Image (cartoon, rainbow, N blue to C red):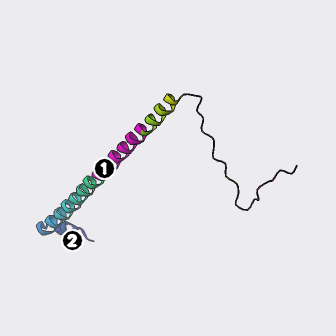
């Protein structure tokens, strides 16, 4: 590009206006996307806080129930046999 063409492009008000509008539209789109991303982030954070509060309340209730029942009440662990293993029999 020659110096004359470059100068002509710089002095063309229509081209300058088109560039300015394109830049403005791009910035506006970025602003909207940023606002949407922030709203999604805040909604996700609020949902996480609510879930954490609910689970904490359930855990505290479970611990309180266990504390009231006392240490002498123990829950037996679930023992499951493998389906293909036959039951063992005592032979006397």
- Tag 2 secondary structure: helix
* Outermost left residue: 13
24 vs 14: above or below: above
- Disc 1 residue crowd, few under 14, some 14–19, many 20+, Cα 10 Å: few
| Quarter location, residue 26 | bottom left
The region drawn magenta spans: 39-57
The image position of residue 56, as x and y in percent, is: 42, 38
Task: Provide the secondary structure element on which disc 1 rests.
Answer: helix
Toward the right, the furthest residue is: 92
**Position of residue 49 in the picture relative to residue 67 (left or right):** left
Residue 53 magenta: yes
Please give the name of the residue rendered at 60% of the width and 29% of the height, measured from the top-left corner.
72
Q: Which residue is mark 1?
A: 43
Q: Residues within 10 Å of mark 2 (few under 14, many from 20)?
A: few
Specify whether residue 72 is painted magenta. no
User: At x 40% / y 37%, what residue is drawn?
Assistant: 57
Q: CA distance from mark 1 to mark 2?
A: 52 Å
Mark with earlier residue (1, 2): 2
In this orientation, which residue lies closer to the viewer: 59 or 90?
90
Q: Relative to 26, is 57 above or below?
A: above
What is the chief secondary structure element of the magenta stretch?
helix
Residue 44 horizontal side relative to residue 59, left or right: left
Compare residues 43 and 91 and report the one nearer the observer.
91
Q: Is residue 62 above or below residue 29?
A: above
As drawn, the label of residue 18 is none
**Which residue is labeled 2 in the image?**
5
Q: Is residue 46 above or below residue 82?
A: above
Quarter residue 30 falls in: bottom left
Quadrant that contains the N terminus: bottom left
């Amino acid at each position: 590009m020659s110096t004359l063409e470059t100068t002509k492009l710089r002095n063309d008000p229509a081209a300058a206006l088109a560039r300015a509008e394109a830049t403005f539209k791009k910035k506006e789109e970025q602003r909207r996307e940023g606002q949407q991303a922030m709203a999604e982030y805040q909604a996700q954070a609020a949902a996480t806080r609510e879930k954490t509060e609910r689970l904490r309340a359930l855990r505290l209730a479970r611990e309180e129930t266990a504390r009231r029942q006392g240490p002498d009440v123990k829950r037996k662990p679930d023992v499951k046999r493998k389906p293909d293993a036959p039951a063992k029999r005592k032979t006397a």
